[in-house]
Image: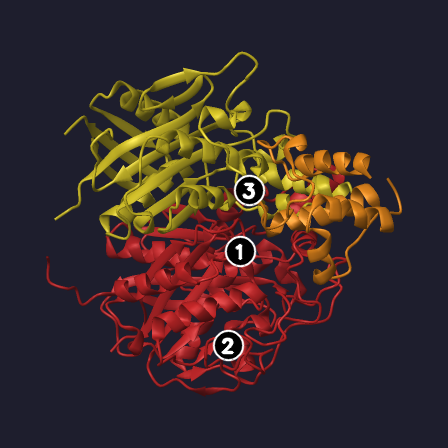
Chain colours: A yellow, B orange, C red
């Protein structure tokens, strides 16, 4: 008997503002976009490590906070976190190299020079102690992270999963030549809370997801195309279908507003 | 000494990126490590970098470290006795 | 509930490159108590390290080309083969060169996706899916877990895993800034342990899903968890690693008493080994099987390491031997963990492989000889 999977909450840091179940809040004057996000916009109370977060980790954390600020995870031990992060920790790697050049290699920066470092503070703050999957591949990494989250729920390895997709390249970064011509330079982050046990007060949007090996000849899609659609459907709380294809993975996500 | 303590408070907030802490709110006699600031072991390492960078001071071992990080005042005291710059 | 399948996830072939050489060389030398750790400095940092036996392997291309013959890709179905690249940082020589000279890298970008594509081509893997997993030092084990899931669910008919992590100035400088390195060399679980030792590592493995033969090595189960405790350090109670191990055993349909030996993470840092001992004691109670760590011989080979260590563990399982733990002499943890000091017979034909990484990530894999 296949387990039914629901999206019970979501959060996103987008060029236009912070999205969540209660709508999208535009950025304040003076905030250019997701990289300018402030702690008080996603968390009511201070979090000691917030200021220490490097850009990719901060975006991931804030998207998670937007999704979980009004959503209580029933059992942290069965709560997984998956993350898709195409640029990996490149942004942070360059900051570490700067600290080395300055003669004082930074311990905190170095500890964040891993694609998986974005998970650390999310797990700590929200008490998410289940399995992790970090995909640092091509531009469909977020989609793969979502697929892996679905797999964790279907196999019973987790009861709920926070699936994140982060694109973090600082506009002023010298990273240009390191990213490749097709690189997406916009800062964005998404978080989707998937569960097999929807809660009262949660979105309760049932999701039927199918993933398959992609068509090697398919146009190279990126997370942006379908996550925008997904957020739009979830914000409007409408049923619908989101289809994504890249050369690695094809996905069809059917959303049924309910129960 | 008080000037040094004030300077240290600001430098600690900046170096450790304690975004929700105002320097003036740090109690100079409260424990620095293991106290209300919620510093972890990586923060302790960052404090060592700060000491070397701003004051040319190093801490020879863990035991000295425990005394030095007992409070901002203890830190200031250590710096005054050992500084080679700043 | 459908009838249980007689099929299993079979570890068909594997290969490694590390300080002691190839898989065959490494295992033979491990049984002899050898170590590839040499004195520092390493990129200017005063710490011992374990470089590749052949220095040319530190380039991703050479490592991939050298490991390619370890698996037979000729019979793999292009439409149902997945390629999983596992690395914490991979080969960042291009990043370092760019920062020094401003010259963009040539063969591949520092991004793991670019390295994965490059390796896939060099390995001649006919894959329809390429997945890049970077779960810190648990990358390889997580890759194996994902590969197992894909095979059991039918999303792939074969999975090729490749891992690569090379020592670099970047990593050496960083670990030194964290005061994580042992000056003289890693001593896992030893009373005098004082930090980890960096090691070069690469590994390759082919997994399929079929009815196994009697002497096949099977990936019987896998599980993972997060400590949710500290940015880099593990939970002091060992709770996360304990839960990952229990999940792996449950996935395998096995009990702790079925395990012949534990391939530990055993980094030789004060906290890891103390935590790991608690997790192991909690799991096995009074009947702890022989435990070993290879990091006193091969160093800590990072994300690729958890793949290469699984390959090494599989080979030890095949030979029914538990290797000694190089660098260990006097137990330095609170729990009575029987850390192997010499080569010994493996009494049960299964191994529990543990790994943990920065960010509280834990991953466990159970290997078993098919009956």
**Is there CB contact under 8 Å for labels 2 and 3?**
no
Quarter of the image that includes the N terminus of chain C: bottom left
- The quadrant in which residue A16 appears is top left
Q: Which residue is mark 3?
A: C111
Residue A47: x %, y % from top left? 50, 36
Query: Can you tell which mark lies on residue C24?
Result: 2
Crowdedness near tag 2: few (<14), some (14–19) or many (≥20) residues, C-alpha within 10 Å: some
Check the image and report above or below for A247 versus C52: above
Residue C132: x %, y % from top left? 45, 47
Residue C152: x %, y % from top left? 25, 57
N-terminal-most mark, 1 or 2: 2
The residue under the point 58% across, 54% down is C61
Q: Nearer the viewer, mark 2 or mark 3?
A: 3
N-terminal-most mark, 2 or 3: 2
Q: Closer to the camera, A12 or C199?
A: A12
Whether labels 2 and 3 belong to a single chain: the reply is yes
* Residue A117 falls left or right of residue C59: left
Q: Nearer the viewer, mark 1 or mark 2?
A: 1
Residue C220: x %, y % from top left? 29, 67
Q: Which residue is mark 1?
A: C233
Residue C272 shows in this picture: yes
Whether labels 1 and 2 belong to a single chain: the reply is yes
Per the image, label 2 sits on a secondary structure element best described as helix
């Amino acid at each position: 008997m296949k387990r039914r999977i629901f999206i019970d909450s979501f959060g996103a840091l987008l060029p236009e503002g912070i999205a969540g179940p209660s709508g999208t809040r535009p950025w304040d004057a003076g905030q250019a976009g997701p990289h300018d996000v402030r702690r008080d916009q996603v968390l009511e109370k201070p979090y000691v490590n917030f200021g220490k977060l490097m850009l990719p980790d901060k975006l991931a954390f804030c998207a998670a906070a937007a999704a979980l600020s009004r959503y209580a995870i029933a059992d942290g031990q069965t709560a997984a976190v998956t993350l898709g992060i195409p640029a990996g920790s490149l942004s942070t790697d360059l900051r570490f190299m700067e600290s080395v050049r300055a003669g004082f290699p930074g311990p905190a920066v170095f500890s964040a020079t891993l694609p998986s470092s974005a998970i650390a503070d999310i797990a700590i703050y929200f008490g998410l102690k289940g399995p992790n999957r970090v995909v640092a591949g091509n531009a469909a990494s977020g989609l793969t992270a979502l697929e892996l989250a679905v797999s964790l729920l279907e196999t019973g390895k987790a009861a709920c999963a926070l699936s994140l997709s982060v694109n973090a390249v600082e506009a002023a970064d010298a990273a240009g030549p390191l990213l490749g011509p097709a690189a997406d330079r916009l800062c964005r982050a998404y978080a989707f809370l998937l569960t097999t046990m929807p809660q009262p007060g949660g979105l309760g949007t049932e999701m039927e997801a199918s993933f398959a090996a992609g068509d090697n000849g398919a146009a190279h899609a990126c997370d942006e195309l379908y996550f925008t659609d997904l957020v739009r459907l979830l914000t409007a709380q409408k049923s619908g279908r989101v289809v994504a294809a890249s050369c690695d993975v094809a996905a069809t996500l059917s959303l049924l507003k309910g129960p | 000494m008080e000037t040094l303590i004030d300077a240290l408070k600001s430098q600690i907030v900046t170096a450790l990126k304690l975004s929700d802490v105002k320097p003036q709110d740090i109690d100079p006699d409260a424990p620095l490590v293991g106290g209300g600031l919620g510093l972890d072991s990586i923060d302790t390492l960052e404090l060592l970098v700060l000491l070397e960078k701003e004051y040319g001071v190093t801490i020879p071992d863990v035991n000295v470290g425990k005394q030095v990080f007992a409070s901002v005042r203890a830190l200031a005291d250590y710096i005054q006795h050992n500084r080679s710059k700043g | 509930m459908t009838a249980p399948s007689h099929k299993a996830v079979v570890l068909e072939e594997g290969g490694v490159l590390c300080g002691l050489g190839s898989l065959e060389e490494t295992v033979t030398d491990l049984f002899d108590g050898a170590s590839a750790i040499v004195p520092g400095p390493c990129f200017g940092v005063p710490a011992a390290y374990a470089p590749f036996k052949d220095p040319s392997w530190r380039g991703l291309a050479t490592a991939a080309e050298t490991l390619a013959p370890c698996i037979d890709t000729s019979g793999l179905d292009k439409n149902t083969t997945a390629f999983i690249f596992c690395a914490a940082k991979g080969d960042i020589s291009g990043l370092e060169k760019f920062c020094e000279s401003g010259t963009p890298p040539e063969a591949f970008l520092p991004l793991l996706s670019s390295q994965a594509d490059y390796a896939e081509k060099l390995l001649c893997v006919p894959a329809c899916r390429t997945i890049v997993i970077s779960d810190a030092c648990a990358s390889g084990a997580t890759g194996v877990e994902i590969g197992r899931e894909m095979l059991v669910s039918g999303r792939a008919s074969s999975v090729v895993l490749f891992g690569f992590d090379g020592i670099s100035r970047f990593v050496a400088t960083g670990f030194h800034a964290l005061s994580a390195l042992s000056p003289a060399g890693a001593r896992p679980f030893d009373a005098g342990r004082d930090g980890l030792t960096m090691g070069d590592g690469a590994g390759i493995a082919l997994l399929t899903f079929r009815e196994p033969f009697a002497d096949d090595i099977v990936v019987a189960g896998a599980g993972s968890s997060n400590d949710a405790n500290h940015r880099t350090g593990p939970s002091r109670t060992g709770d996360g690693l304990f839960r990952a191990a229990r999940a792996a055993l449950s996935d395998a349909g096995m009990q702790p008493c079925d395990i012949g030996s534990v391939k530990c993470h055993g980094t030789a840092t004060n906290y890891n080994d103390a935590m790991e001992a608690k997790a192991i004691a909690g799991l096995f109670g009074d009947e702890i099987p022989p435990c070993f760590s290879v990091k006193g011989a091969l160093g800590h080979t990072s994300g690729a390491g958890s793949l290469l260590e699984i390959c090494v563990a599989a080979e030890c399982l095949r030979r029914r031997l538990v290797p000694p733990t190089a660098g260990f002499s006097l137990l330095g943890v609170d729990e009575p963990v029987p850390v192997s000091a010499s080569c010994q017979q493996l009494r049960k034909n299964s191994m529990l492989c543990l790994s943990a990484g920065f960010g509280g990530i834990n991953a466990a894999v159970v290997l078993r000889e098919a009956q």
